[in-house]
Amino acid sequence: MSQSPTEQPARNMAAAKFTRKEVESRTDALIIDNVVYDVSEFKQDHPGGPDVLMANIGKDASQCFFDVGHSDIALDWRKQFVLGEVVDEERWPVKERVAAPQEEPEPLTLGALLNVWGPPLVVAGLAALLYLYLFP
């Protein structure tokens, strides 16, 4: 039974270790947070287009990946493309990424309600008065 891309288990990351030089020489791999990914099967399906991936082939694309602000689904989906990890001697510190704090919504006040509904109600009232004046 075949699995959809989101259901496929991640490849065993312990299976392969790569030096950064080895990743540079590949035409299908990039690094995100010390994990090596094979993007050859994903190039054409990438929502940002293949050029974005191709510009980062052979490089550490961690900063680029997180600057874009990928969804949680994208973070989970990338697991299926894991080839291995960077060798321990060449690992870079992984920056902890925290979610941006969500702002508290402003409480609903009478002033806010009037700012939203006031102008349309005034226009409707004027239109009704004009109608009654013109068509008694």
Image: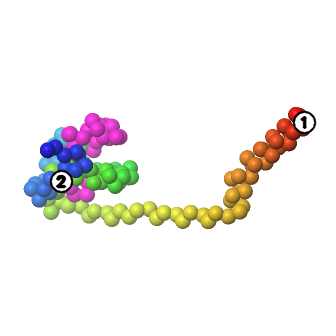
Q: Could you tell me if residue 103 is visible in this image?
A: yes
Residue type beneath disc 1: Pro
Q: Quadrant of the C terminus?
A: top right
Q: Give the amino acid at mark 2.
A: Ala
Say whether residue 75 is left or right of residue 23. Answer: right
Residue 76: image quadrant is bottom left
Whether residue 31 appears in this view of the structure is: no
Q: CA distance from mark 1 to mark 2?
A: 75 Å
Element assignment for label 1: loop
Which contiguous range is marked in magenta? 32-56
Who's the residue at 71% across and 62% down the image? Answer: 110
For residue 99, side relative to residue 92 (left or right)? right
Q: Which of the 4 quarters of the picture holds residue 98?
A: bottom left
Image quadrant holding the N terminus, namely top left
Residue where numbered disc 2 is placed: 10
Residue 111 is situated, as x and y percent measured from the top left of the image, at: 72, 61
Q: Is residue 43 magenta?
A: yes
Find disc 1 in the rendering and name its residue: 136
What crowding class fits label 2: few (fewer than 14 Cα within 10 Å), some (14-19), or many (20 or more)? some
Instruction: Residue at 86% x, 42% y: name it.
Output: 129
- Does 107 appear above or below 117? below
Residue situated furthest front in the rendering: 136
